[in-house]
Image (cartoon, helix red, strand yellow):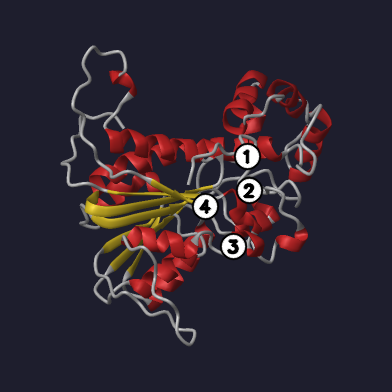
Amino acid sequence: MQDEPLNPTQSDSERDITSDELSFVHDAVLLEETVAAVLGVKSLPKQKDGDQNGLNISGIYVDATFGRGGHSRLLLSQLADDATLIVFDKDPTAISVAQELASKDSRVHVVHDSFATLTDSLAAMGISEVDGLMADLGISSPQIDDGSRGFSFMRDGAVDMRMDTSRGQSVAEWLEQVDDETLANVLYEFGEERHSRRIARAIKQMESYESTLELAEVIKEAHPNWQRGKHPATQSFQAMRIFINNELGDVDEFLAQSIAILKSGGQLAVISFHSLEDRRIKQFLQRHSKGQYPEDENLPMLPNRPRYFSKPKRVGPSKAETSQNPRARSAWLRMATRTDTEYQQTVAP
């Protein structure tokens, strides 16, 4: 598939989702494609009489973004009884769901933390390498649907936006302290909002930050021009959420750690929903599959850099999936196989 740029203003949270579509958005995106990729197979066995015929594969696997467990459950159906699945998530509600699954399936082990802690968390479990890593980045539909979490500009709630409500600073607390210029820079960098300075000034003139609907309305009134059919607060909400949760920093940490933690022949499969994430994944895999690094560009002779991954592949959702699950429309799955090249700690991520 030819590589095409994503819409730079695309939000992974509420991208053109209407009330009529909410019944579909809970489905795991690119479900079979992702599980097949992390197992290193072309496709999963066909179902017969409603039962999934498992591949019975052994090994250690990681679901770095458990969510509500759609990808994990399908992966478990393909794993042998002696396999291990470690699931990560920041969200306490997602962790509760994961712990319930773990209570019924001894192969599942739960980590309540960011996937940026991948290496340290696995080391604490006595695991130094795994057979496969998968991640579904961004915000989940249940988080959007719960107005109290603060992610939605269509449902009223506290201006929180933390993935992990048990720790850290909420967006409301941050807005009370941040200056206009810093806020504008965040809106521009993480939301690619062209009118960031105007919107930042309007936000800082608010008396309080207790209501997501009030915040969204202020942004709407300050925004001089917006795309038809797209709420003017989309990019600003995305930017504040990404910033407060350090989402892009966590993605960079996760990708860098994947090199050392994957076995030779192990699989990396990552789903993204907007250009800021997808660009990072694409560049990471290109760099480490070609052995080409930015710091080498001006050297008279290019050094022989290690190639840690095979040529990456990209898969998008089928028309059938996008018709059933509107959230899948902006999704891309990028995947690659870890080569047998020994990891060198000195190489820049």
Q: What residue does disc 3 label?
A: 321
Compared across the picture, whether 165 is left or right of 44 comes to right
**Residue shown at the point (70%, 40%) measured from the top left:** 234
User: As shown in the figure, which amino acid type bears the numbered disc 2?
Assistant: Ser
Numbered mark located on residue 224 in the image: none
The three-letter amino acid code for the residue at tag 3 is Glu
Question: Which of the labelled discs sits on residue 316, or is there none?
Answer: 4
Label 4, label 2: how far apart the Cα atoms are = 18 Å
Taking depth in this image into account, of 117 and 52 the one nearest to the observer is: 52
| Amino acid carrying mark 4 in the image | Gly
Earlier along the polypeptide chain: callout 1 or callout 4? 1
**What whole-number distance in Å separates the C-alpha atoms at marks 3 and 4?**
10 Å
Q: Quadrant of residue 193?
A: top right
Of badges 3 and 2, the one in the foreground is 3
Which residue does the numbered mark 2 point to in the structure image?
13
Point out the frontmost of discs 1 and 3: 3
Q: Earlier in the sequence, mark 4 or mark 2?
A: 2
Looking at marks 3 and 2 on the same chain, the residue that comes earlier in the sequence is marked by: 2
How far apart are the alpha carbons under marks 2 and 1?
A: 7 Å
Q: In the rendered view, tell whether residue 191 sits above or below residue 43.
A: above
Q: Which of 173 and 41 is in front in this view?
A: 41
Tell which circle, 1 or 3, labels the residue nearer the N-terminal end: 1
| Callout 3 secondary element | helix
- Residue at 44%, 36% in the rendered image: 280
Residue 131, given in percent of the width and then of the height, sits at 26, 58
Looking at marks 2 and 1 on the same chain, the residue that comes earlier in the sequence is marked by: 2
Residue 238, disc: 1
Question: Marks 1 and 4: CB-CB under 8 Å?
Answer: no
Q: Nearer the viewer, mark 4 or mark 2?
A: 4
Upstream in sequence: badge 3 or badge 4: 4
